[in-house]
Amino acid sequence: MFCDEFGDGLDNNYVINPEKDPVNSKTFGVNKRSKFGRKENGNGPKSNGKNQKRNSDDKNNGYVSAMFRNNPQVPVGVINKQAENQTVIKKNKNSLFSTSTFKDLTDLHPHMVANLEQTLGVTKLTTVQSQAIPVLYSGKDAMIQSETGSGKTFAYAVPLIESLHKIRPKLSRTDGLRALIILPTRELALQTYDNFIKLLKPYTWLVPGMFTGGEKRKSEKARMRKGITILIGTPGRLLDHTMNTKSISFKSLQWLIIDEADRMLDLGYEKDITSILSAVDEQRDESISRQTVLLSATLSEGVQRLAGLSLKDPVHIDASSIGVSDPECLAIPDSLMQYYVIAPPKLRLVTLSGVLLQKLQKGQNSSKTLVFMATQDMVDFYTELLTTVLTCLTMFKLHGNMTQVERMDVFKSFKAANHGVLFCTDVASRGLDLPLVDRIIQFNAPITPTDYVHRVGRTARVGQKGEAILFLTPHEALFIAKLQDHSIIASELKMDKCLTSILTMEFEGEYVKTAEMAANILQSRMETAVVEQDRLHELGCNGFKSWVRSYASYPKSSREVFNFKDCHLGHYAKSFALRDAPRIIGGIGKPKKDPRMKNQRKIPKSDSGPLFKKRKSDKIGSTSEFDSGMKAKKRKMN
């Protein structure tokens, strides 16, 4: 390993020539340099065997920059374990589509079949739909467990609409609420609402509505007074209206759908859902039968507890592990290609850039990519930075701290766009169906394999092809073995192959011959942009600090893989294009002379002084030792 201990960019065996290098020779002196191992020779460096060997390596391989030196290596034991498991594990293959079509369902109205085919282009039943729809037709409660992107929404939407439009006399919007659908996020609620609008095209007398956080309560109350047949919403806003809106009533409720139940429990909505269920039971009319459906990708203890509260003699439909006896096996669509990239912290940023540029290199201009980040501040920073540097790509961002209007605008714009990159947090990891998304990049690894499955489920939906790329650092490589324990197999994508895509960029005035040179220039451009733009620097520091807090707070059970003590914070700062030391970024210390500190607020001189000030009432004067201390009475003048 060749270490630059002086921090001046010179190698340790470099010889100082006073004529060519007056600064270093004046600073260190010839003799001082020699004490540190940098020896002087009038004609150049001494030709010992070590130097000769290194010089020959430099001629053959070229100069190795600091970015590509002193990087941690992947533990050998981890690689061997992966190779052993690769030969033993068999992937959990699950057929997404069944052999049946919607026309084969005899109870389905011809208008619904024609609408599915003409408006939505759907003819075949997926596996979960073929199992769930007949059960829900029979009027039984159901708990549906299926992989993400398997068509669960239509599995309950079709029988729900069929049962309501067959009621005679026809329902009107004044007949009260008949169906309630609870979803974890606003984006998923909007997507489900759009699907219901399309499915209800032949049945205009059935009115859908959507209540989510961020919208005006007054307008929602007005819509509720006019009448809604099918209400779709998020737990927080629905509970708010349940407690405060008199016009909302669950007396005539016939359908209760709890979608993405595991995700809602992860977000802490268990108390809200329990309160909504209690309100529904209190207002229930015993003469009207109610059917409850709970959908979840995973079956945790919390989901089972929620099922016990809401379901009555349910039918358990498990379409996630057909033909597989291993309960630890997580289902992944067959059309999804999975890869992982092991990149040292210093090279993560340029490697991400190379991966994003790969599609352009292949001429795939209609590609859409989702990039998952750990925190909201990271999403803000990387969107801003890569928009500044990689101008050939269209960037979007989505996270929970954005306003409702901003989130909806981004969701609709990205959905309608032909190409683009969406940086997001886990707010987009569940249930969202974004068309033409053919690649998922997880820049920060998920904590559990279950979270991994939900993230990659945003692509390869309903039989489409997709690609998932997982970024790992060398000390996180053990996570591959954790995935393999759940029958999830990913192939390695070499970092060098990703970096070659950077050569497609235009480097004006630069002679770029290798991918290493291109990566160095790109990293330098990004660091320069962060130094020159105060907003980028602030976003970068916030992103770095939020990542540190996030990584340090990982649960104890995951520290075998994600151990904060293994992180070299200085190297990770490079992945945020920051040249500052981590202690300065975190605010622990401040540089003595930094141009950015000139605008810092200075303590006014008036604030400085003695710790305790004398009160105005205190009088300075001499006091006699015989003084009683009592105030003297004023004499009255005659």
Image (spheres, helix red, strand yellow):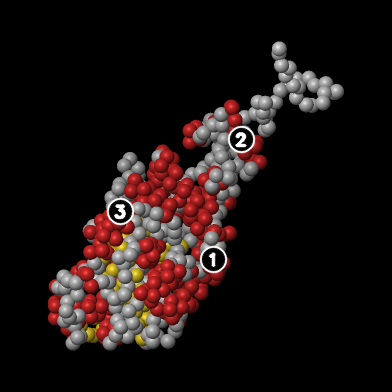
Earlier sequence position, callout 1 versus callout 2: 2
Residue drawn at x 48%, y 51% is 544
- The CA span between labels 2 and 3 is 60 Å
- Quadrant of the drawing holding the C terminus: top right
Of helix, strand and loop, which one carries label 2? helix
Q: Position of residue 239 (x, y in %)?
A: 38, 65
Pointer 3 residue: 405
Q: Is residue 332 above or below residue 340?
A: below
Label 2 packing within 10 angstroms: few (<14), some (14-19), many (20+)? few
Label 1 packing within 10 angstroms: few (<14), some (14-19), many (20+)? few
Residue 368 lies in quadrant? bottom left
Q: Position of residue 508 (x, y in %)?
A: 31, 42
Depth check, front residue: 147 or 445: 147
Earlier sequence position, callout 3 versus callout 1: 3
Residue 220 lies in quadrant? bottom left
The answer to whether residue 57 is left or right of residue 263 is right
Q: Are marks 1 and 2 in contact (CB under 8 Å)?
A: no
Callout 1, which amino acid? Pro
Residue drawn at x 30%, y 65% is 247
Please name which of the two marks, 1 or 2, marks the residue nearer to the observer. Answer: 1
- The CA span between labels 1 and 2 is 48 Å
**Residue 576 got which mark?**
none
- Quadrant of the drawing holding the N terminus: bottom right
Of helix, strand and loop, which one carries label 3? helix
Pointer 2 residue: 28
Pointer 1 residue: 555
Q: Is residue 211 above or below residue 80?
A: above
Q: Are marks 2 and 3 in contact (CB under 8 Å)?
A: no
Q: Position of residue 534 (x, y in %)?
A: 42, 39
Depth check, front residue: 348 or 161: 161
Callout 3, which amino acid? Val
